[in-house]
Image (cartoon, rainbow, N blue to C red):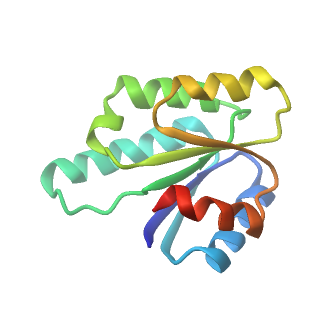
Amino acid sequence: MLDKIFCVDDDLITLMLCKKVIERVLSTKEIHTAQNGEEAIQYFKALAEKYKIDKNTIYPKLTFLDLNMPIMNGWEFLDIYSALGYHEIFKDAKFIVLSSTIDPQDVNKTKNYSVVIDFLSKPITKEMLENLKDKLS
């Protein structure tokens, strides 16, 4: 069971759909959202501070991340997340790129990030989440 999931996307409809599908398919207590990479970094920064004080702090074990966002895109987020060492703090956190891009270079680029376990095309569906259950356990 995933206690907390995080969705990062600049499109409010995508965020709403993401939450609805996740609620129906995965047993998740909390679903948090951010509308760009900068908000997501701030979210993880606050969690890292809490985690330093209390190692029992619950953090998202799974994050759905859009690539094309204003302010800070998904690539910039992943680079900063790694540079700040969050991949070391949140060792079992996984990311799934959820994007509308059709560029094969984007799919290949995700392989450069050890925290990214999959690349999915929008919109998220019940079937996608059902197929992900094996990767998440």
Q: Position of residue 92 (x, y in %)?
A: 35, 49
- Residue at the spot 54% in from the left edge and 22% down from the top edge: 112
Q: Position of residue 33 (x, y in %)?
A: 58, 57
User: Going by the picture, which residue comes out furthest to the right?
Assistant: 102
- Residue at the spot 82% in from the left edge and 33% down from the top edge: 101
Left or right of residue 20, residue 89 in this image: left
Q: Position of residue 109 (x, y in %)?
A: 64, 22
- Residue at the spot 82% in from the left edge and 55% down from the top edge: 123
User: Going by the picture, which residue comes out furthest to the front?
Assistant: 134
Image vertical order of residue 102 relative to residue 132, above or below:
above
Image vertical order of residue 1 relative to residue 87, above or below:
below
Q: Name the image quarter holding residue 127.
A: bottom right
Left or right of residue 39, residue 58 in this image: left
Q: Nearer the viewer, residue 41 or 65?
A: 65
Q: Quadrant of the C terminus?
A: bottom left
Q: Position of residue 77 (x, y in %)?
A: 53, 31
